[in-house]
Amino acid sequence: MTALALSRIHFPITTLGPGKRVGVWFQGCSIRCPGCVSMDTWAAGKGMTTVADVLDTLAPVVSSADGLTISGGEPFEQSEALAALLRGWHRLGGGDVLVYSGRALEDLARALSELDGLIDAVIADPFLRAVPQTVALRGSDNQRLVTLTTRGVELFSAYEAPLPVGERALDVLFDDNTGDAFLVGIPRPGDMVKLAAALKAAGHSAAATEDVR
């Protein structure tokens, strides 16, 4: 069985690609961009499971999902697990696939060629805190959205347009087992820290996963 270090799975999410999507976050990232909002996904070796178990979790919602978004963490640091998960997703009849990576696009060329047809679009390049954030789906505008299939072109070309001024959307998701709430999407730098502080001031338990170095 193919091992996979997993941070979390959420369904549905609507802020990381078109339609209602399954979100899968890989655990472990050696890039560790300053200001990253997902610092909790950096540590390697946590959340160990198998691709088969993840696919078992996804199977009941595949027919209700428009697509799959994979983020992290750095998915391409678990290349074998990523490939197995993508093949399994397509065997289940899943929709389009968007993968986030903090690696430079040029460094992904070989990996993407080996996954030909399995990924419809990729967002590549490291998050840069000093760069403006004005384009949909990106944490910073230096990040590149590359469509890899005809379906990718059809679904993701619209995301090259700038965000309307002031428009931000985050999904609020709940863990039925713990009662924890999670926000999913692309916040502005500093927003998560401000939100955590506001919730604490109101008497709630809150933590931000944003790197504030």
Image: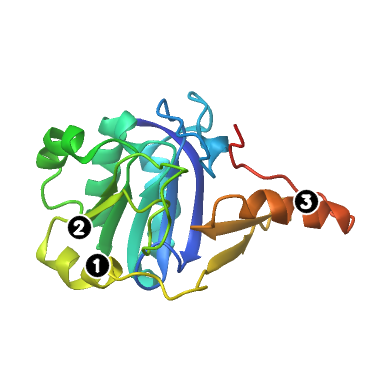
The crowd level at tag 1 (other Cα within 10 Å; few <14, some 14-19, many 20+) is: some
- The residue lying toward the viewer, choosing from 187 and 77, is 187
Q: Which mark is residue 21?
A: none
Report the amino acid beneath label 3: Ala
Q: Earlier in the sequence, mark 1 or mark 3?
A: 1
Q: Is 202 drawn above or below residue 108 in the view shown? A: below
Q: Which mark lies nearer to you, 2 or 3?
A: 3
Q: Position of residue 178 (x, y in %)?
A: 72, 50
Mark 3 sits on what residue? 197
Q: Earlier in the sequence, mark 2 or mark 3?
A: 2
User: Is label 1 in a helix, a strand or a loop?
Assistant: helix
- The residue lying toward the viewer, choosing from 174 and 105, is 105
CB of mark 2 within 8 Å of CB of mark 1?
A: yes
What residue occupies the far bottom of the structure in this picture? 164
Mark 2 sits on what residue? 120
Q: Earlier in the sequence, mark 2 or mark 1?
A: 2
Report the amino acid beneath label 2: Asp
User: What is the quadrant of residue 182 in the picture?
Assistant: bottom right
The crowd level at tag 3 (other Cα within 10 Å; few <14, some 14-19, many 20+) is: some
Report the amino acid beneath label 1: Phe
Q: Residue at x 16, y 36 (%)?
A: 106
User: Is label 2 in a helix, a strand or a loop?
Assistant: loop
Considering the image in quadrants, where does the N terminus appear?
top left
